[in-house]
Amino acid sequence: MKIALFGPPGAGKGTQSKLMTEKYDIVQISMGDLLRNEVREGTSLGKMASEYMDKGQLVPDEVVISMLKERLDEPGLKKGFILDGFPRSLSQAEELDRIVDLDMVINMRVDDQFLVTRITGRRMCPCGAAYHIVFNPPMKEGFCDECNQRLYQRDDDTEETVKRRLDVYHKETEPVLDFYRKKGILKEVNGNKSIAEIRHDMVELLDPLEEG
């Protein structure tokens, strides 16, 4: 089972990826985590990536794809994997297509305004607890239920930043989705639903793959 999961920032890709790995015993591959691990471990590819990251530049596609290729060659992927938020551009999709044949690409469609409300309402605690002013408010406004520390909003959770990230996502991702649509492997789920409902819809798509 070789899957790629798409969705805008805040859509819940990480949550659904984790649920799918638990159900199907496949491996979640987050390119962000993979990149950070390579840099932290000081691998040759990690050092190459650091040179660009230290200058505030994007890591070239060939470096990212090489990292992914090495990861896909590692043991433990016998039952498959789910790519979390990758590829991010048409060029990455074309490069990925040369090293692996994906079985399915799932796009989580979520309304922009719903995402703005979801992301800008997030509140974090230094202890690691997370809240939402609408969907999961703390018992005492502005303070953590666990440790009573004052909650804060992440710098990248402001409305201006969220809208900018969504604009970039739409601009870069539409060509990627069209690429997979033409290949006939693109499926979509309604990401405006609850976590449980989205999981149900994804399982309906993936069960036939597992059985096949």
Image (cartoon, rainbow, N blue to C red):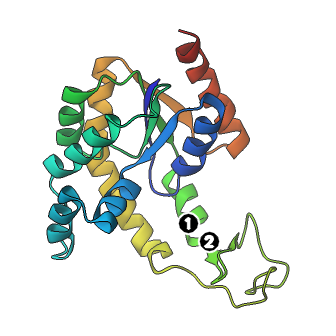
Please name whichever residue, 115 or 200, is drawn nearer the observer in this view of the structure.
200
Q: Is residue 62 above or below residue 167?
A: above
Residue 12 position in % (x across, y down)? 56, 51
Q: Nearer the viewer, residue 212 or 134?
A: 212
Three-letter code, disc 1: Ile
Q: Which label number is shown at residue 166?
A: none
125 left or right of 112 in image: right
Query: Is residue 194 visible in the rendered structure shown here?
Result: no
Q: Secondary structure at mark 2?
A: strand
Residue 59 shows in the view? yes
> Could you give the CA–CA distance between mark 1 and mark 2, rounded to whole angstroms?
5 Å
Which label is found at residue 122? 2
Q: Residues within 10 Å of mark 2 (few under 14, many from 20)?
A: many
User: 113 above or below 177?
Assistant: below
Identify the residue shown where x is 34% and y is 53%. 169
Q: Is residue 126 above or below residue 185?
A: below
- What mark, if any, has residue 119 been given in the picture? 1
In the picture, measured across the screen, residue 212 lies left or right of residue 135, that is: left
- The image quadrant of residue 134 is bottom right
Q: Tell me if 205 is positioned left or right of 32 in this view.
A: right
At horizontal 56% and vertical 22% (from top left) the residue drawn is: 206
Quarter residue 124 falls in: bottom right
Residue lying farthest right? 139
Q: Are marks 1 and 2 in contact (CB under 8 Å)?
A: yes
